[in-house]
Amino acid sequence: MNKYFFYILIVFSSSLFSQESSIIFNRFNLSVFNPAYVGVNGSAINLNSRVQWLGVEDAPLTNYLIIHLPEKKNASLGFTIQNDRVFVENKSQLTIDYSYKLKLSNNSYVSLGLKAGGRFFNVNFNKIPRIFNESNQSISSPGNYFSPILGAGISYISKKGFLGVSVPGLLNRIGLNQNQDWELTNRDYTYLHVSGGVYLNLSNKFSVNPSLIYRSIPRELDLFNSIIEMDYNDRFSLGSVYTNNNTMAFFLKLKSKKGFHIGYGYEFSTASDMEAIKNSTHELMLRI
């Protein structure tokens, strides 16, 4: 009985391993998925924290630190540190992101980007509640593993909007070590990330900025994020996010005169399934 329980658990975990985290403020953190967006808004330090399914023990927790250095000779360098924790899993990721601008006109350019780094996984079976006090010595933990990351992207940027296409992970490899107890199927899949949006100025102070983000991951549901942001005087904005993954979110963002950003997002499930987790998700974003 216990062996079947663990088998079901590891199958569930393998599907989580293959996914990148979804964030409400991904519209403002696109370099996480596409290195060609590094430096688009100048040098910055971004902090993003996402607490999913509030009230559920060991629910997903995601933290990002994104650094964009000042541009030099049309080139920008950035760093992304990410940590995801959910139940027995702990995933950390570090990448170096590079972009180079090719100017098309005074108001537009094409950016080429490269991403390189590594992903570290840890699975801790000691956090699993036990029916018996003694552990089953015949079942060994999958343990830790390291996975290299190599990605590439391209983006078009203008005063009227943006469009980007990337493959955040070009390497397709099996993660975790095979052992005598588990037949592991989890894999770091290559997937496609497409993003685009326009800036619609309604007046000198009001603008509406719709955008769409698409991710295609093998063996998973293709994910669409539709985002609408209403901005006042580049200081205050309200927005909503709707996904085809049965979630909807609203966010608020403030910007000071010195360029300091702070944002809060609230996400909830729209699924009618009684078994779906209905707990809300909260997200904070800071940009310096």
Image: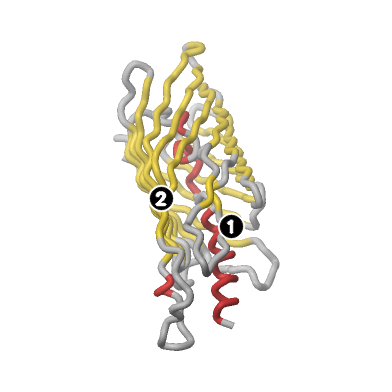
Label placed on residue 185? 1
Secondary structure beneath dot 1 equals loop
- Percent from the top left, x then y, of residue 73? 34, 16
Of the 4 image quadrants, the one containing the N terminus is: bottom right
Q: Is residue 207 above or below residue 11?
A: above
User: In this rendering, is residue 247 above or below 127?
Assistant: above
Q: Residues within 10 Å of mark 2 (few under 14, many from 20)?
A: some
The secondary element bearing badge 2 is classed as: strand
Residue 49 in the image, given as x and y percentages of width and height: 40, 54
Q: Which label is found at residue 150?
A: none
Whether label 2 touches label 1, CB < 8 Å: no
Q: Please report the residue visible at 40 percent of the width from the left and 59 percent of the height from the top.
A: 144
Residue 146 locus on image (x, y percent) = 41, 50
**Residue 237 in the figure: left or right of residue 78:** right
Task: Describe the colour scheme in one phrase.
Answer: secondary structure
- Earlier in the chain: of badge 2 and badge 1, it is 2
Place of residue 121 in the rendered image (x, y in percent of width and height, measured from the top left): 42, 56
Q: Disc count in the image?
A: 2
Q: CA distance from mark 2 to mark 1?
A: 16 Å
Q: Which residue is mark 2?
A: 146
Q: Amino acid at mark 1?
A: Thr
Residue furthest to the bottom in view is: 132
Q: Residue at x 47, y 12 (%)?
A: 106
The residue that appears at 46% across and 64% down in the rendered structure is 142
Q: Residue furthest top?
A: 105
From the viewer's side, name the closer residue of 42 and 72: 72
